[in-house]
Image: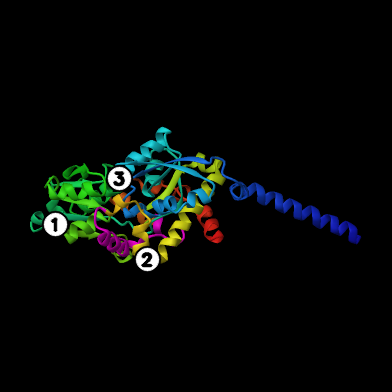
Amino acid sequence: MSELRIARRRLLMSTAVLGAGALAMPHVARAQGKPEKQKVLLAVGGKSALYYLSLTIAETKGYFKDAGLDVEIADFQGGAKSLQALMGGSADVVAGAYEHTIRMQQRGQDIKGFALIGRGMQISIALRKDVAAKVKGPADIKGMKFGVTAPGSSTHMLLNFWAAKGGLKASDVVAIGVGAGASVVAAIEKGEVDGVSQTDPALTILTDKDLVKIVLDTRTMKGNQDVFGGAFPAASLYSQTDFVKKNPGTVQALANAIVKADQWLQTASPADVAKSVPEAYLLGDRAVYEKSFAGVRETISPDGTMPAGAMENCLKFLAESDPAIKPATVKLADTWTNEFAERAAKRS
């Protein structure tokens, strides 16, 4: 065979391989371009909580704008309501608990997460001080009222999980939606609830005021190890799978902004973080906010990707707290993709 024919053959083979690669990875190729949708409607439940800090940082530091996006954020009382906004068509994307992707799959709805904010749950259960002495374990909370962000949200699910450890059903405990932030503190101070399942900074404020006793804590990686056996995927960006497929450029831009915020938070001083959020988020006490951030920093994802084993930990948690979850029928691979966060991390 002549050298010219050999060269032509190699060229044809190379072209075929490249073409096959392009067909196999359409998201990768298209995600390098500009966002298909520059105006993005994003829903979140309880944005002032440290649970969603990366979202706030991406907004206040202009990371969304740097990525070519105009992101309009609608803040609901809890994650369940922001999920409703997505499914109802009034939001393109949600900043919410990863667990919702599993729940919706069980209901026949395809939801996919693509940028992780929290690698630890960051939610804790606390009892009012005058009630705590009566509770030796979760079996003793039957009939009690607990303040959660909103019924059906992750705060509610953790409460159900703990109740189940005491042999109780979800209906044995009363979950009352109190939102996040100052309303949580008020619910305890006014005696409207016996306890709360909530995020920081509200928990730290209640603890510093000596109003509550923490009985289950996932605000540290050790706490997540003790409760779930390892990393636990918490807040993330997710959307309907069809949106992710049709708008890879937009999804990539969103991931770029969140990952940049995740990375900034790894080394930012608590004082700088406090200066970067709206004054109202401090709940009137900057020092407590800074202390709260320092306490949960390690649970913030360093790169936006899903840690190994974390999805499995979440599925086990859901199955133990909700009989409607059937682990054998769940396809975890369909609930998450690391491709956008990995690409975003490489850009940084």
Q: On the picture, is 17 further left or further right than 87? A: right
For the residues marked 1 and 2, what is the alpha-carbon distance in whole angstroms?
Answer: 28 Å
Q: Is residue 70 visible?
A: yes
> Does label 3 or label 2 sit earlier along the sequence?
3
Residue indicated by mark 3: 153
User: Which tag is nearer the camera, tag 3 or tag 1?
Assistant: 1
Characterize the local packing of mark 3: few (<14), some (14-19) or many (20 or more) Cα atoms within 10 angstroms.
many
Indicate the position of residue 65 as horizontal and vertical percent values: 50, 48
Q: Verify CB contact (< 8 Å) between mark 1 and mark 2.
A: no
Q: Which residues are magenta?
A: 283-311
Residue 274 highlighted magenta (yes or no): no
Residue visible at 54% across and 40% down? 37
For the residues marked 3 and 1, what is the alpha-carbon distance in whole angstroms?
Answer: 24 Å
> Does label 1 or label 2 sit earlier along the sequence?
1
Q: Give the label on residue 31, or none.
A: none
* Depth check, front residue: 184 or 176: 184
Label 1 element class: loop
Image quarter for residue 287?
Answer: bottom left
Indicate the position of residue 312 as horizontal and vertical percent values: 39, 56
Residue visible at 14% across and 53% down? 139
Residue visible at 41% across and 60% down? 301
Q: Give the label on residue 211, or none.
A: 1
Q: On the picture, is 140 further left or further right than 88? A: left
User: Callout 2, which amino acid?
Assistant: Ser
Residue 310 highlighted magenta (yes or no): yes
